[in-house]
Image (cartoon, rainbow, N blue to C red):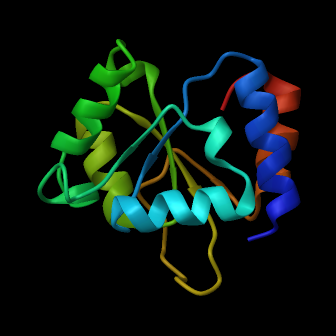
Amino acid sequence: VEIDGVRTLLEKLKHDGVKLAVITATPKKLAKIALNTVGFSKYFDFILTPELIKGGKTRRLIFIISALMRFTSPKNCVLVDDANYAHKAAKRTGFKTIGIYDKWRNDSLDACDKKFLNYNDMLEYYNKNGKL
């Protein structure tokens, strides 16, 4: 993952008032350490993990709770992820989904609404269209 592209995208989204969350299979304590290490903590409003919501990104519940924590409907939420199983669960919840290619995972991402090869491409799309 090219950190600069991610940082630029996160800065733009946060500046534009987009509420951002981390939904991860990583234990919350480790996720916080990782976000702090790369300086990304300031961009995210909350972290959800399977420690809190059983089933994690394989089930709809974590996405429903994420929308509720933003005080919005799932149809107003977008999942950005490299895992096709997460896209399937998020779409069943009503989320829009964006796949980001990960060469180590090499997932098909066939359940996504949109796909990007990297975060710089996603930023370019966002800058051009004003939304993801």
Residue in view at x 80 percent, y 35 percent: 11
Outermost residue toward the top in this view: 71
Residue in view at x 67 percent, y 16 percent: 17
Residue toward you, 91 or 47: 47
The answer to whether 37 appears left or right of 72 in the picture is: right
User: From the viewer's perspective, is residue 77 above or below residue 39?
Assistant: above
User: From the viewer's perspective, is residue 37 above or below residue 68?
Assistant: below
Outermost residue toward the left in this view: 54
Q: In which quadrant will I find the N terminus?
A: bottom right
Q: How many marks?
A: 0
Residue toward you, 66 or 96: 66
The answer to whether 70 appears left or right of 52 in the picture is: right
Residue in view at x 44 percent, y 68 percent: 30
The answer to whether 92 appears left or right of 21 in the picture is: left
Residue in view at x 20 percent, y 59 percent: 51
Q: Indicate the position of residue 58 as horizontal and vertical percent values.
A: 22, 60
Q: Indicate the position of residue 84 as horizontal and vertical percent values.
A: 40, 65
Residue toward you, 74 or 112: 74
Q: Quadrant of residue 49?
A: bottom left
Q: Indicate the position of residue 66 as horizontal and vertical percent values.
A: 32, 32
User: From the viewer's perspective, is residue 66 above or below residue 70?
Assistant: below
The answer to whether 56 appears left or right of 106 in the picture is: left
Outermost residue toward the bottom in this view: 104
Q: Quadrant of residue 99?
A: bottom right
Q: In which quadrant will I find the C terminus?
A: top right
Q: Indicate the position of residue 10 as horizontal and vertical percent values.
A: 73, 40
